[in-house]
Amino acid sequence: MQSWACFYLDKEKDLIVDLKKENDKLFYTLSTPNHNSGNLITNLAKLCKLDITYDSIGLKIIEGEVPCYVNADNEKVYIFRLANTKVANIYPDGRIEMKASIPAISKTLMSQTKDYNIPESKTIVKTYIHNECKFKTDLHTHMNANLHPDVLIAFAIVHQLAYPLYYIKKLGLLCSDKQEKLLAKQREKVALSYKNSQLSGKYLQRQIDDHTYINFASLILENLENCRYNLPKIRNSLAIMKDGQAVFTNLEKVYFYRYVFCKGKVSDKLIKLKDIEKIYDKDVVNFCKQMHLDLKNKNYHKFSLRQHKLLWVARTYQRYGIDYVEISDTSLVKEKDAPIYLKEIHQALPLIEKETGVKLRFLVALRRVPLNLGSDPANYLSSANENIKVLKAVASDPYISGCDIVGEEINDIRDLKSLIKELVKIAKDEKDFVIRIHAGENDCLCDNVYNSIECVKQSLIDNQKMPKVRIGHGLHVASLSSKKGKQLIESIKENNVVLEFQITSNVRLNNLSSLDKHPLKAYLKEGVKCVQGTDGGAIYGSNSIDEQLSLEKMLDLSEAELLQMKKCESEIIQEAKTEFINKEKKFKEEIKREDICKHYQKKIAEQKLDNNNEEDKIELINSLDLGSQITKLDKDKMPIVVVGGSFNNQRHRLSVNKDNLALLDYLLKHGDPNRYCFVFGYELKAYEKYLLENNKGKFDLYVIVPAYLDKNHYEKIKKSKVKVIVSPEKEPMGLYKSFAYEIFKRRKSILLGFDANSAGLNVIQEAKNAKKCQIYISEHSRLLKIKAQSLIGYVNLFKDGKKVAKEILQQ
């Protein structure tokens, strides 16, 4: 039987249904080739009570016949069902009408465990939203995360973007013989330019590969024999990891792969674009065709790469019924880039809005942890001065709605109070200016939401009114029924703060494993203003419709609750329309006939900053001062990583449990110090302290410390008999990345999870993702137990510590 058609049960094209026809009979094969563990298809088969079989290369598949019916119009229709839910109507002429899908959340949780236990009603979701409840905004998204992989692939083909050899090697892509020779020849030339470089080894090779390019259109169109192999790999690199939950390092990796598509350059060697129809993926073909027409369209033919990208961002939102979008973008605080970008925005957006009806607006994004902190990470404001300078100059632009503090939530928001003061000053002059802060995404910093609001309030000048404040995420806070929680609710309502929720990114980035603790319903019950965002849905296999369906189905939101959220976003849309009209009028009066780019270059140059606005600094010491204690992990010993002292928020009350202590006692007494060593965080409390006090010099004890330590931790570590591994991470909550790099990704190891918050969950998730670690989690920690239950088949949940210790030493 020949393949007749195919469709997908999810937005990322991971759940593939291939259809084959024989006479009047239609047969299907369901496969998940992008998921190596096999958990996704195994759990789906179990949920739907279907049998697993295997294809010719041994991959798990589900096979069956699609029954045929005759409808009231005497038309034949094949109806594909899963678990009694109609998923698709399939017609003899090849038309396929999707009726249900599997949200990215369900797919991720199915991939994460060997024992999925979420019911079918929350897994296979009917794709219908009541018209009156349909959301019309995406108020929380990021510029380089908006376009889905297939659109980016088509974009790179049509614009013939340069694609680095490093990416080809990293993804294991296949080139034609001719392309291999051309790349080898080009690489030789690039290598010559580095002959006097001070770089060596892998760092030198990386630089050479980064600057050796192939035309992406050539990689695809002049290499069609490898297209079916290459496209899925490229597509997968442009979205978050598939087989389970990811951590922030995985997100950074996705942005790295997206960079060439979102901020790339046109190749030096162009080719004739032909054989696009031969690309096997119809979506990519159709996107390429439309983009090719854009280049001939009188409105768009002079568009820059960035303007064309904005056109497709708007078209994507139009497709999902979104009218108003606010996009966070770090490019708008770059002194050289912002004036050019704003000129492009003013040229393109009126044309884009005329076609799509979608209003694109921007939040100027400032990083909560700068990429380069220099020698003093405490002095945040000095490193952000240039950003503030640009922001002051562009804040009055009609397309700028406000600002955003973005990045991984690994620091207390109060550390950024001096930055927030500068933002509040801007809001005094721009009365509709939005200050959005990413907060409450990480449960190690449960006070960040409340403290974000307090930082804004305490920064108000004279009789300044509270500016518009929005909190991105607001997921992890004090219990809303507690005294602190009630205080938070009162503060949110009193200051008219709006909370934004993005449930899919929370799950996929390991910030939410159990949906029953999500606070959205509690917020709505208290009358808090809440809206939905996507967080850049293309990265997470979601979109605005999927996000709303996930909120509704996973959290059991009622129609009344959805309408409550709809009312809030409608108010924001109306205010934004009025604001834009007023700002545009002022802008035209101000700029007159001046070139927009030159106008902003001049305004930026005129800005003056108050460099004396500094908060009290914590005394920090470079951890390299620890001198002889600094070492590398012994390659001949298996690390036992202890999560039970560090990786907690300051409010978390740590106590030791006798069953867990029994585990450590047995290992210390019977373990072989020539075979094992212990590794833990730098707090040196609870179980870490117990190891220090009871080791008696038998085992090597290692601590991983951030690049800078406060004085108290420095003195504590210096006095203790531990070996020190220095992380490049400057923020303590980012240390999980070093545990992954130094241990989990490089060698076999053991992890003992006794007690932790989100940063500890990231350590556990990194250990699971690396697939080289035996993970043991204590039942005595409620949070870790929830995490363990989402990783069934990959972790050992224990109560009897001594028994587990014996198992470890016997292996």
Image (tube, grey):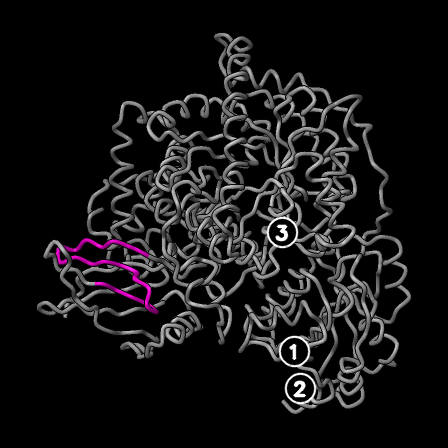
Residue located beneath label 1 in the image: 776
84 inside magenta stretch: yes
Do the numbered discs 2 and 3 sit on residues whose CB atoms are within 8 Å?
Answer: no
Which mark is on residue 522? 3
**Residue 632 shown left or right of residue 33 in the figure:** right
Give, as a three-letter code, the residue at label 3. Answer: Ala
Which mark is on residue 750? none
Residue under the point 50% across and 51% down: 558
In this rendering, is residue 379 above or below 116?
above
Residue located beneath label 2 in the image: 808
In this rendering, is residue 770 above or below 235?
below
Instruction: State the SS at label 3.
Output: helix
Residue 759, how many percent across, how many down? 68, 60
Q: Which residues are magenta?
A: 79-99
Magenta segment, prevailing SS (helix, strand or loop): strand
**Residue 20 shown left or right of residue 363 in the figure:** left
Do the numbered discs 1 and 2 sit on residues whose CB atoms are within 8 Å?
Answer: yes
755 inside magenta stretch: no
Can residue 584 be seen? yes
**Residue 564 shown left or right of residue 373 in the figure:** left
In the foreground, 722 or 517: 517
The answer for how far apart the CA atoms under marks 1 and 3 are is 34 Å
The answer for how far apart the CA atoms under marks 2 and 3 are is 43 Å
Give, as a three-letter code, the residue at label 1. Answer: Tyr
Can residue 238 be seen? no
Instruction: State the SS at label 2.
Output: helix
